[in-house]
Image: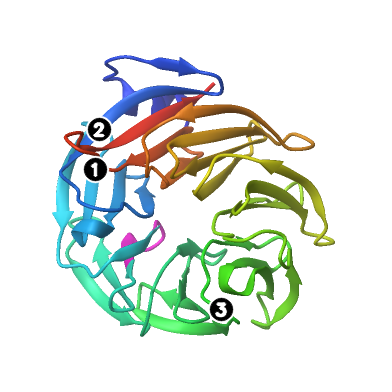
């Protein structure tokens, strides 16, 4: 998908608020969404955004062309992780409440099966083979074949996995393990942990981003609020900088060599990560807006804004500049 085509998705722009690094391009109403909003996923072919409304036990589907919520899937049990497999055209929703991963056909969003993981199903990522990998339970990564609706593999971990990144270039999976105060390095072939990094570096290590070409992972922490850069070759910390509080999502913009982190204290932090790591701007959002997704194919950062008082929940779309 070309950048010029992507611009067509966001032609209906009421106003643009310019701040260093990002321009607020569009706001899309989600309506009355009680409680927390968790992770999001994108269906590029249909230009649709999937939003986990954890507090509502539902998933909203947003048409990015019209800027409207076109569907709501109810009856979930604390939906946390969500992924979309473009290879199979299947959306997968992982729920903490019952440990299930529910599958939906991308064309009409009809149910396509359920995979039971047992407990606290969470983050979802796609691997190099087009399968989905889900963190769950007291310590596990499950590999799912969503076309067949089956779990095909399992990796045992020493704690519940939060953020994780799959590095096909090095056949590694880097996994955040907050309860163990470490980042586990898993060999993709054997499914075994081969290293543990960042032991007690800080507390509350949830978000993570990968710079595959540069051989770095970026790890966000909550106490103290910070972001560190770690070499994927050696596990050594090369940079450690303070940032906004209650960070929950972190993304690497490879085209600009930047980082974007959304924080629950009501900010998005922008970092220059070309060589070192420097926070260049901090953009105001709304308290509790911890969830975001950066979509390189659209060249947009999308932030979920929770309801606050009489202000409805929204999706804010930012254009990097």
Query: 228 or 84: which is nearer to us?
Result: 228
The reply to whether the C-beta atoms of the residues labelled 1 and 2 are less than 8 Å apart is yes
In which image quadrant can residue 266 be found? top left
Disc number lying in front (1 or 2) = 2
Mark 3, mark 1: which one is toward the viewer?
3
Q: Secondary structure at mark 2?
A: strand
Q: Which residues are magenta?
A: 85-93
Image location (x, y in percent) of residue 149:
33, 78
Task: Look at mark 1 in the image and give the residue it sits on.
Answer: 62
Q: Residue at x 19, y 48 (%)?
A: 33
Q: Is residue 43 above or below residue 296?
A: below
The residue that label 2 is drawn on is 28
**Does label 3 or label 1 sit earlier along the sequence?**
1
User: What residue is at 35 percent from the left and 55 percent from the top?
Assistant: 38
Q: Is residue 60 left or right of residue 171?
A: left
Q: Label 2: how many residues lie within 10 Å, few (<14), some (14-19) or many (20+)?
A: some
Horizontally, residue 162 falls left or right of residue 211, namely: left
136 versus 247 height, above or below: below
């Amino acid at each position: 998908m070309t950048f010029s085509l992507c611009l067509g998705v966001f032609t209906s722009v009421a106003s643009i608020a310019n701040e260093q690094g990002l321009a607020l391009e569009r706001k899309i109403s989600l309506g009355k969404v009680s409680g927390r909003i968790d992770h999001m996923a994108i269906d590029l072919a249909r230009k649709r955004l999937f939003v986990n409304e954890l507090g509502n036990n539902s998933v909203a589907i947003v048409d990015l062309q019209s800027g409207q919520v076109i569907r709501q899937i109810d009856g979930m049990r604390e939906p946390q992780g969500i992924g979309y497999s473009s290879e199979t055209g299947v959306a997968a929703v992982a729920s903490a409440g019952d440990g299930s991963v529910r599958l939906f056909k991308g064309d009409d969003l009809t149910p396509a099966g359920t995979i039971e993981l047992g407990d606290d199903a969470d983050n979802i990522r796609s691997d190099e083979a087009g399968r989905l990998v889900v963190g769950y339970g007291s310590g596990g990564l499950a590999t799912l074949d969503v076309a067949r609706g089956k779990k095909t593999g399992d990796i045992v971990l020493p704690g519940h996995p939060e953020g994780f990144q799959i590095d096909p270039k090095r056949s590694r999976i880097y996994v955040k393990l907050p309860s163990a105060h470490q980042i586990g390095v898993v060999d993709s072939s054997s499914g075994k942990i081969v290293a543990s990094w960042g032991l007690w570096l800080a507390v509350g290590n949830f978000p993570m981003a990968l710079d595959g070409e540069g051989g770095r992972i970026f790890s966000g922490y909550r106490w103290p609020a910070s972001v560190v850069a770690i070499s994927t070759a050696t596990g050594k910390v090369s940079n450690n900088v303070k940032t906004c509080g209650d960070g929950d999502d972190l993304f690497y913009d490879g085209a600009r060599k930047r980082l974007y982190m959304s924080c629950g204290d009501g900010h998005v932090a922008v970092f220059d990560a070309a060589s070192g790591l420097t926070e260049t701007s901090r953009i105001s959002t709304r308290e509790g807006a911890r969830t975001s997704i950066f979509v390189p194919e659209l060249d947009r950062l999308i932030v979920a804004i929770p309801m606050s008082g009489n202000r409805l929940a929204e999706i804010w779309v930012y254009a990097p500049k």
